Image (tube, rainbow, N blue to C red):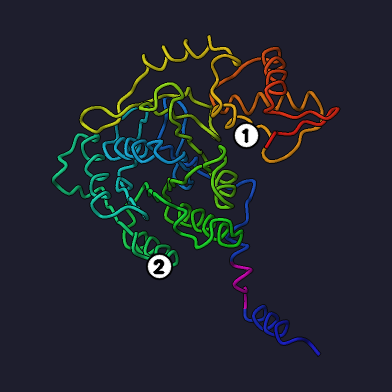
Amino acid sequence: MEPANLKMGNKNIKNGMTELDKMLQAALIKANDKYSVPPQIIWIENSTIATLGNFSASTGKAKSKKTFNVSALVAASLSNGNVLHYRAELPGNKRKILYVDTEQSRFHCQRVMQRILRLAGLPEDSDCDNLVFFGLREFDPATRLKLIEHALHKDEGYGLVIIDGIRDLLLDINNPGESVMVINKLMQWSSQFNLHIHCVLHLNKGDDNIRGHIGTELANKAETVLVIKKNLIDANISEVKALTIRDREFEPFAFKINNNGLPENTEAIIEEMEMVRSKRSPISDLTEEEHSQALKVAFNNNEISGYGKMIKALTDGYSSIGFSRGRTVMSKLLSFLIEKGYVEREKNIFRRSN
């Protein structure tokens, strides 16, 4: 006797295509089909960071000025022009931008909106039809998801969606099931509504990994992930670089906040500081905090077996704080770390000291 579900499947087949058949047919890729190249909408210099039908992210630690950076990206998109190093061109039927903030008060949300308008060269005391801003702080994660989806269904003119605080679309940032569900929503929305979604998420306090399981999923699936970090020499300056990018990598750039409360480029200052940084000695100039941060990245809570692997881990760890050196310097640095008690060595096994 056939199981009930099999009978139902056979019945559906007799009556024509099942829902699964229809879904597979729609998902079928054929060699002779013609697919259009996803429209590019946002660039940094000549590197594409956003296309319609995809999603991206900005990440950084607290007070790194992530939202200021996103404000510049949105302002470039709103004006179809250039702001900081961002250049944008949204199609005529996709000029609207939906900005969703999940954690700030309405007062602070309005300040972000006004900053975007000023950067775009628009009056800050008049609503702009192409910028729709929602503050969803008071809602639970499930309701936030429903509200975003409802907004997308109501207007087909959105070309760019900002979710400032994607962490707040989940109850548990480390829950694999919730994380996959939210990432699937981003993929579904960006494809279904033919738009680009840019998310904002924090880095871990103790290292440079994106927070939680949602961060891992985001880094694996996003078109571009931008990292915003405070400059090691001048905390008033923030640096922007690519953590992951599908297109060619762009040269990192930096900005500071001017007297009008707006981000502005600081190329000359960064060039000067890079020259200073390149002359620094790992033993005499690196602070204890910098060593600690670099070693967290290098060891990642694990012991390391083998001298070569240790040197590679140190190279990666110290590069994450802006201290990039060759193998000779890293070898001297390892000897220094062992001598000072930062690193313990037992034969060919290396451990970070507690």
Give the labeled residue for mark 1: 297
Residue that extends furthest to the bottom in the rendered view of this protein: 1
**Which numbered dot is residue 143?**
2
Number of on-image labels: 2
Is 288 drawn above or below residue 7 in the view shown? above
Q: Residue at x 50, y 58 (%)?
A: 185
Q: Residue at x 54, y 16 (%)?
A: 285
Real-space CA distance between mark 2 and mark 1, rounded to the nearest whole angstrom: 36 Å
Q: Which residues are magenta?
A: 16-22
Q: What amino acid type is highlighted by mark number 1?
A: Val
Q: Residue at x 50, y 40 (%)?
A: 37
Query: Quadrant location of residue 337?
Result: top right
* Quadrant in the picture for the N terminus: bottom right
- The answer to which of 10 and 66 lies nearer the viewer is 66
Which percent across, then down, holds residue 19?
A: 59, 72
Which percent across, then down, holds residue 156?
A: 34, 56
